[in-house]
């Protein structure tokens, strides 16, 4: 039975597509796009979570003060208060990524596409050559997960760390390192 698959124009793009099919990445809620402090405060005070974010950001004002601020968008508040409102708004607007699940880190990866090590270059995952099989259990996922959770796992970063921290940990350096110079990759997780 086929498992989840990721496709992309590079190994890193295919890896990211596979991971995003399994877990939610760090992202910004589309409904949180207000720029002005008053609009941000209005949105924050509409939910319990928003009030909690204001408290966590360090905004400690009376209800009367909040009502005064909300009743007049031109109300002149101190810059430090605007900064706290903005901080709270950003904290509510950004949804953290789910951690990379164990079934991904412990999975068997089958990579199809052009694979090169030293002088050996071939298209894997065809009748002529089986996919490159990698055991994720042997890899070191710490840096990949750290970048993922921070929302900074680009395709290039993912490819570099997957090669160095997962492929090399599983099957070694290869003849002269591993390179994925193709323009189309497919990765199946088993």
Image: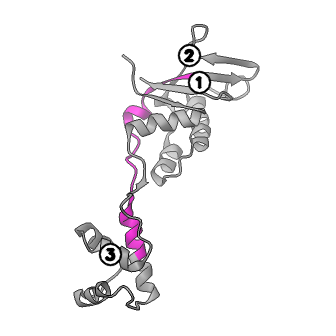
Residue 18 in the image, given as x and y percentages of width and height? 46, 34
**How many numbered tags mark residues here?**
3
* Residue span colored magenta: 86-112
Mark 3 and mark 2: Cα distance apart in space:
53 Å
- For the rendered model, the colour scheme is one colour
Between 66 and 176, the one lying in front of the other is 66
Of pointers 2 and 1, the one earlier in the residue sequence: 2
Q: Quadrant of the N terminus?
A: top left
Residue at figure coordinates x 41%, y 91% from the top left: 76
Residue occupying image coordinates x 32% and y 75%: 54
In this picture, residue 67 sits left or right of residue 101 = left
**Measured from the top left, where is residue 154 in percent x and y?**
56, 46
State how far apart marks 2 and 1 are (Cα). 18 Å
The mark lying in front, picked from 2 and 1, is: 2
Sequence order check, earlier mark of 3 and 2: 3
Residue under numbered circle 3: 54
Residue 154, magenta (yes or no): no
Q: Quadrant of the C terminus?
A: top left
Query: In which image quadrant can residue 164 be found?
Result: top right
Mark identifier at residue 125 = 2
7 lies above or below 141? above
To which residue does mark 1 refer?
171
Cβ–Cβ below 8 Å for labels 2 and 1?
Answer: no
| Mark 3 Cα shell of 10 Å, populated few (<14), some (14-19), many (≥20) | many
Residue 45 x, y percent position in the rendering:
27, 74
How far apart are the two marked residues, 1 and 3, measured between alpha carbons?
50 Å
* Dot 1 or dot 3, earlier in sequence: 3
Q: Nearer the viewer, residue 149 or 143?
A: 149
| SS category of the residue bearing label 1 | helix
Q: Residue furthest right?
A: 119
Camera-nearest residue between 136 and 9? 9
């Amino acid at each position: 039975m086929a498992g989840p698959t990721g496709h992309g124009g590079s190994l890193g793009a295919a890896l990211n597509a596979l991971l995003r099919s399994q877990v939610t990445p760090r992202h910004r809620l589309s409904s949180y796009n207000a720029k002005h402090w008053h609009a941000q405060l209005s949105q924050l005070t509409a939910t319990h979570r928003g009030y909690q974010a204001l408290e966590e950001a360090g905004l400690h004002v009376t209800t009367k003060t909040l009502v005064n601020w909300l009743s007049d968008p031109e109300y002149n508040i101190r810059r430090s208060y605007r900064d706290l409102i903005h901080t709270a708004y950003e904290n509510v607007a950004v949804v953290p990524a789910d951690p990379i699940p164990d079934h991904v880190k412990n999975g068997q990866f089958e990579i199809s596409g052009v694979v090169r090590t030293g002088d050996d270059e071939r298209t894997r995952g065809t009748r002529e050559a089986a996919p490159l099989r990698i055991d994720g259990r042997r890899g070191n996922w710490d840096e990949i997960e750290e970048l993922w959770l921070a929302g900074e796992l680009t395709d290039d970063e993912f490819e570099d760390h997957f090669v160095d921290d997962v492929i090399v940990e599983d099957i070694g350096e290869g003849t002269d390192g591993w390179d994925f110079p193709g323009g189309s990759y497919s990765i199946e997780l088993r």
